[in-house]
Image: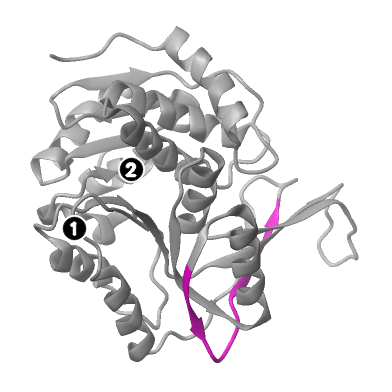
Amino acid sequence: MIYTVTFNPSLDYIVSVDDFQLGLTNRTNFEQILPGGKGINVSTVLMNLGVENTALGFAAGFTGAEVVRRLEEMGVKNGLIRIESGFTRINLKLRSIDGTEINGQGPVISKEKVQELIAQIDELGAGDVLFLSGSIPASMPDDIYRKIMEMLDGRGVRIVVDATRDLLMNVLPYHPFLIKPNHHELGEIFGVTLKTREEVVPYGKKLQEMGAQNVLISMAGEGAVLIAADGRVFSAPAPEGKLVNGVGAGDSMVAGFMAGWLEKQDYEHAFYMGVSAGSASAFSEQLAVKAEIEAVYRQVTENAETIIGA
């Protein structure tokens, strides 16, 4: 079974405003509400690709109930633990000003609720896939990623980690199946500036040497690189298309990669599926559906660069 973990889910309120003015009343010309959070984005794209999965994490208040309702409507199985106080956060995303967001705090997660989640994850075994994505709420221990991976170590669970800096580095000794830094995050880890696909390869290999099995590096308009567990390196330019909504593109990439891997157990196909899913979501109003991903996949395979390495 496939499980995603979202420690701090959200309802994403996505709006566009013509000529936004500070200090004045602004009116939207576009708005939508979607369940959000990195793990939930992964669940959504997996479901869009026909891959059944269960969403784990926490839900509180009327907003949490709405997140659960929308997930179940999509067919995602609900494993979210109910928090009795507070409410699941609302994130305001102003689409007409790229990158402008106001994100809520979310509810306080008690130690008892954290232990409930740990108990759910403790049931995983050989053949299961677990996605650990995003930041940790202030009320939770900041070493929870490492504790989860330590608990599951040696059980045959394929774990995907999409996190930054210390959260990522602390799990490498437990050999995550896939990590997905972007080139800026990779550069920050090693104190360098990385701009081209060729430049990221040696640093991706360093993360592999430190324990990661597969390192998928997203580079926005520059494309992506995969340092695969079998020693090969794959590189692809970004597909052509109009950026509509960058929210969830990275989550779509890891979802597409794992969907591709589970389909054929082939790193090349998984890489192309990852690039296609990430790009298709960036070109779409919402997270990409299967037909959109398949359309981009054809372009990716046609323009893919030669495999680097043996």
Q: Is residue 212 left or right of residue 55?
A: left
Residue nearest the viewer, comparing 40 with 290: 290
Q: Is residue 52 left or right of residue 163?
A: right
State the residue position of label 2. 180
> Which type of secondary structure does the marked residue at label 2 adopt?
loop
The residue sitting at 12% across, 60% down in the picture is: 153
Residue nearest the viewer, comparing 287 with 1: 1
Q: Does 10 sit above or below residue 206?
A: below
Query: What is the x, y in percent for residue 244?
Result: 68, 35
The residue sitting at 13% across, 14% down in the picture is: 310
Asked if residue 36 shows in the view, the reply is yes
Query: What is the x, y in percent for residue 14?
Result: 72, 55
In the image, which residues are magenta?
79-94
Q: Does 253 sit above or below residue 301?
A: below
Query: What is the x, y in percent for residue 283?
Result: 64, 31
Q: Quote the CA–CA distance across marks 2 and 1.
A: 13 Å
Kind of residue at badge 1? Val
**Would you call the spot at circle 2 few (<14 residues within 10 Å), some (14-19), or many (20 or more)?**
many
Among the two numbered marks 2 and 1 on one chain, the one whose residue lies closer to the N terminus: 1
State the residue position of label 1. 171
**Would you call the spot at circle 1 few (<14 residues within 10 Å), some (14-19), or many (20 or more)?**
many
Residue nearest the viewer, comparing 268 with 122: 122
The residue sitting at 51% across, 14% down in the picture is: 298
Kind of residue at badge 2? Lys
User: Contact, CB < 8 Å: mark 2 with mark 1?
Assistant: no
Asked if residue 103 shows in the view, the reply is no
